[in-house]
DNA sequence: CATATTTCTTCACTTAAGTGAACAAGTGAT
DNA sequence: ATCACTTGTTCACTTAAGTGAAGAAATATG
């Protein structure tokens, strides 16, 4: 399991065995049951997450309705906005599947950063990379219709369509579950 | 004019007079006429922009249609994706108004960064800040209807509604100009 | 195993956005 | 002043998403 973590890190910086052991000794791994809520609206938290196995999701509740805006799967990291801004969270984070997560917080990472300056470098690269990805994603979302977005998802993250309930997918695509169901039927018809 | 730049910088790091002069001596300021295209699809470029006065816009051409995904006005910076990825650009950048821009490139900024390490710090903070803003914006876009997005814009960037042609605004909101026109009429009716 | 709950689809109807066309107002250039 | 072009609105019609309800299918849970 930890290999997933070190594979990920090795894409950015190389670690010695000592460094790996130092990280493991912090004991940051956590096993979480499907449906568990990791963060609630209004709550303050310092924790950020790295998905080793499973899937977590971020959603707002607006007018009593869940609006899912992101899914994070293996090798993806999530730093909630409230950690940076130190304000109460505007959204929820919960587990879509039974998952294994690395959960850390500012204190922990300050400790790691000061011991291993490499980590600061990795974080900078990561945040720049994420920013670029985010911008492309946003543009893609803006420039396409719900149907195109679904087809895109089918191309780029086909696993999500299998592992995530459709009402969550629908809201992620910006539509209602009924519309997603219709849209899927429409696409199937075209293909036949 | 340069004051806008230094005001902006002073929000992140403080500069001595010498440092200010060093920046000015690079002569990065450029005056650009309305309608000028700064970057074309397929083009490679190293330049990134900081708007001192005016407004620039980023747009894709998809199926022959312009899809505007962002506007940048005073005190906003734009680093095109192609600068980071070193690939040909997927989009266009052009001037909405007569503008005064700071135009720089990797070489320039490497030079500045090595002379003044302060700048590297500012860039890291900026990119983290931008990432956070971007995520909130994306969530906001995803969780609202075109009408809500228009009302949001009216709240948060009312200037854009005045200075940008409506067909560009419409595409920014994810709809056609006719729909924006209708939507505005609808809102006006509700208010009366 | 039976029951409850969640998940997904279907249907009829409403609402809002897309389309194509026509027209008026504003802007620029010659 | 005229003509071309851009910009914004309106209209009639089409298409797709929202809504509320009903029911089938799949998953938990006792």
Image: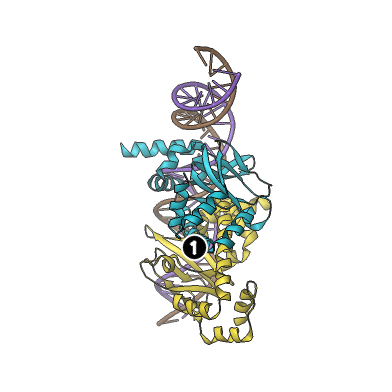
Chain colours: A cyan, B yellow, C brown, D purple
Position of A176 relative to B125 (above/below): above
* Residue farthest left in this picture: A192
Quarter of the N terminus of chain B within the rendering: bottom right
Q: Which residue is mark 1?
A: A125
- Image coordinates of residue A118 in percent, x first then y, are 51, 63
- Image coordinates of residue A145 in percent, x first then y, are 45, 49
* Residue farthest front in this picture: A18
Seen at 57% across and 68% down, the residue is B163
- Image coordinates of residue A186 in percent, x first then y, are 39, 38
Q: Secondary structure at mark 1?
A: helix
Toward the viewer: A192 or A166?
Answer: A166
Residue B164 shows in the view: no
How many numbered tags mark residues here?
A: 1
Residue B2 shows in the view: yes
Position of A59 relative to A136 (above/below): above
Seen at 56% across and 75% down, the residue is B119
């Amino acid at each position: 399991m930890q290999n997933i973590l070190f594979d990920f890190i090795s894409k950015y910086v190389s670690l010695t065995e000592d460094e790996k052991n130092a990280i493991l000794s912090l004991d940051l791994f956590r096993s979480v049951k499907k449906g568990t809520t990791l963060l609630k609206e209004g709550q303050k938290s310092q924790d950020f997450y790295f998905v080793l196995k499973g899937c977590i999701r971020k959603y707002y509740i607006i007018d009593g309705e869940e609006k899912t805006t992101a899914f994070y799967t293996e090798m993806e990291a999530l730093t909630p906005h409230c950690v940076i801004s130190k304000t109460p969270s505007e959204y929820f984070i919960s587990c879509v599947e039974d998952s294994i997560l690395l959960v850390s917080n500012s204190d922990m990472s300050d400790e790691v950063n000061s011991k291993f300056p490499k980590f600061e470098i990795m974080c900078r690269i990561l945040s720049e990379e994420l920013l670029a990805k985010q911008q492309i994603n946003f543009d893609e979302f803006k420039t396409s219709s719900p149907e195109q977005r679904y087809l895109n998802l089918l191309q780029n993250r086909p696993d999500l369509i299998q592992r995530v309930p459709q009402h969550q997918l629908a809201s992620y695509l910006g539509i209602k579950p009924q519309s997603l169901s219709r849209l899927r039927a429409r696409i199937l018809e075209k293909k036949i």
